[in-house]
Amino acid sequence: MSGGLKVRKVAVVTGSSRGIGYGILRRLGKDGFQVVMVATGEMYKNQAALEELKSEGIECVYIQANIGNKEDREKIVSETVKAYGRIDVLVNNAGVAPKERADLLEMTEESFDRVLSINTKGNMFLTQLVAKQMLKQNIEGKKRGTIINISSCSAEVSSISRGEYCVSKAGVSMLTTLYADRLAKEGILVHEVRPGVIATDMTSTVQGKYDKLIEDGTFPIARWGTPDDIAGAVSAFAGDNFLYTTGNYIDVDGGFHIKRL
């Protein structure tokens, strides 16, 4: 435990230039974290988002990286430590959907490999690097670190037109369990947030489908979810609200997970 001035904690959020990731990053910044925006695009493309954070007094470093790439994963850790000296929270949010929705019997190996490489493999090995970095650091506060995986209701819900996505998110759920088991004794807690239908760029292409499901009463809370809904759950996990739980998940899906007759 450090004994001098209070150290400001640092949160890394992957895929955080827009959508759910940006909502999470902004919320953690408002919570007092120094934040790291990780995105695949060049910095100038996300300047508006960075300016908004700055106007709100949020200190943010930008790192251009693709979590599906080994060197980029190493870059995320090294540049964060160079800028802030530590990592206290990792939010594994970055992910991709299949480029084309295809029936399970028509899914290509190329699509499967692409989605799993980013959504699952990228998560696995970035978490490994960050966990090792956390183990080098002094403990600040009541825990050594927090890792939060953004998976999906698709970890359990079948979508036969995007099977590779479902498999990738089911893998993320198991990574939550595995890392929670391995890291609990180290003072690092691991949690999972499962979004349902959230209004983002990824879901905009199927808006009509989900509008009808909402209208037909599929979701007990009859509206689209928002990035702020996800950010609220992440904020709770990142703070000191859950110190005697690890390896659990929370559905942020408007009650979609409830089985009804």
Image: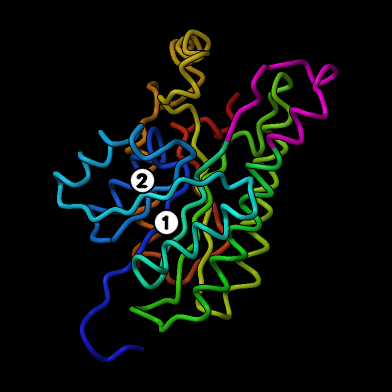
Q: Amino acid at mark 2?
A: Ile
Q: Is residue 34 left or right of residue 106?
A: left
Please give the residue where the numbered disc 2 appears in the rendered image: 24
- Please name whichever residue, 156 or 259, is drawn nearer the observer in this view of the structure: 156
Tell me which segment is drawn in magenta. 96-115
Q: Is residue 72 left or right of residue 217?
A: right
Image quarter hosting the C terminus: top right
Dot placed on the residue nearer the N-terminal end, 1 or 2: 1
Report x, y in % for residue 33: 28, 61
The residue at the point 68 percent across, 35 percent down is 115
The residue at the point 63 percent across, 42 percent down is 119
- Local crowd at mark 1 within 10 Å, few (<14), some, or many (≥20)? many
Report x, y in % for residue 208: 48, 8
The alpha-carbon separation of the residues under discs 1 and 2 comes to 10 Å
* Quarter assignment of residue 112: top right
Instruction: Return the mark for residue 4.
Output: none
Please give the residue where the numbered disc 1 appears in the rendered image: 12
Label 2, secondary structure: give it.
helix
Image quarter hosting the N terminus: bottom left
Is residue 187 highlighted in magenta? Answer: no
Q: Looking at the image, is 183 positioned above or below residue 29?
A: below
- Local crowd at mark 2 within 10 Å, few (<14), some, or many (≥20)? many
Q: Looking at the image, is 184 positioned above or below residue 149?
A: below
Q: Is residue 198 left or right of residue 117?
A: left
Label 1, secondary structure: give it.
strand
Report x, y in % for residue 145: 45, 70
Q: Amino acid at mark 1?
A: Val
The residue at the point 50 percent across, 24 percent down is 202
Q: Looking at the image, is 116 positioned above or below residue 189?
A: above
